[in-house]
Image: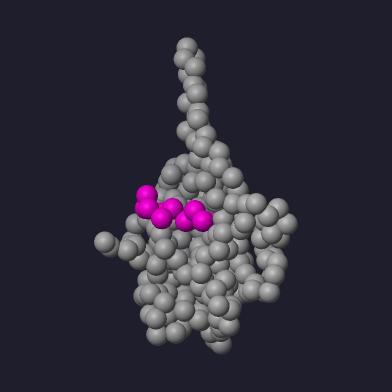
Amino acid sequence: MFSQHSGCALPLVALQYMSLRIEVDVRPLYHLYTIIDTEPSNATFGKRIRPDPLNSEHYLNVFTNVATGNTLSSTNVNLFGNYIFLDKDERPFVIAKVIGYDATQWSKVIFINRGTNHKVQKNASVMNNAGVIGHVIHSSPNSSKVLLITDGRSAVDSLFQETRESGITVGTGENICEMKFVPISAKINLGDKVISSGLGGVFPKGLVVGRVVDIVKQSQELFQDIMVEPSADLSNIEEVIVLLPNQVE
């Protein structure tokens, strides 16, 4: 079996006649987090600042997303886990603010304040701490256009986290997605998590897409009708993480 908690998927093998020892590397919490200043007017803009492990007050304030002193404030500091390990390597990323929404009711698009000047390219994956938001479909020097996964033009090659059954998560134009091409024989349950499969060349493997909220099986059909609720709240997005291409040495 595997742990259901993301990042804690330790394979636990039941051995009847053998003992099993799992060694866990425990490190101080300040090794796992990085403070990123996102306020352009600050001298530390764009830099990663680790909390001071010898200053308990500073560490506590940093952990609660508030930095003390005159340099940083709670409105321009974001706390992110320094553990975006995708495709077996740490993936570089930038933080972007949402600066606009598409005005039409048929399109699910947002605009962010990072572009080619920040190494943001077309097809870059966009996410937040809850999961996948979408991908970049156009990038200019200082802004980019992001297609949300709920848009009817969006398609994410996906897997069910538990069963590893595959399918395609597509947008419906509403605040929900549909997972297509899941065989009628596949055992899927309400609440099952859906993650990206890594296929298709846009989304790295293992990003949380959403969870199953409705299943319809019809015996004469080849595939199930499965509705997936996005894990990220796409109606209230303020900041996002944009994954950048891996650096090639």
Q: Is residue 72 left or right of residue 81?
A: right
Of all residues shown, which one is farthest toward the bottom?
103
Q: Which quarter of the image is occupied by the C terminus?
A: bottom left
Residue plotted at (49% across, 17% down): 19
The part of the image, by quadrant, that contains residue 63 is bottom right
Q: Residue at x 52, y 34 (%)?
A: 24
Instruction: Inspect this view and state whether residue 107 appears.
Output: no
Residue 115 position in % (x across, y down): 42, 80
Q: Position of residue 46 (x, y in %)?
A: 51, 73
Of residues 56 and 207, the one nearer the viewer is: 56
Q: How is the image coloured?
A: one colour
Magenta range is 80-90
- Name above or below for residue 37 compared with residue 206: below
Pick out the residue farthest to the top: 17
Q: Along the line of sight, which residue is nearer the eye, 206 or 61?
A: 61
Q: Is residue 13 above or below residue 146?
A: above
Which residue is located at x 47 percent, y 79 percent? 114
Left or right: residue 164 compared with residue 95: left
Between 77 and 1, the residue placed more toward the observer is: 77
Q: As drawn, which residue projects farthest toward the right?
A: 57
Residue at x 57% of width, y 71% of height: 37
Q: Position of residue 218 (x, y in %)?
A: 50, 51
Q: x%, y% of residue 57? A: 73, 57
The reply to whether residue 38 is visible in this rendering is yes
Q: Which residue is the extreme one toward the left?
A: 249
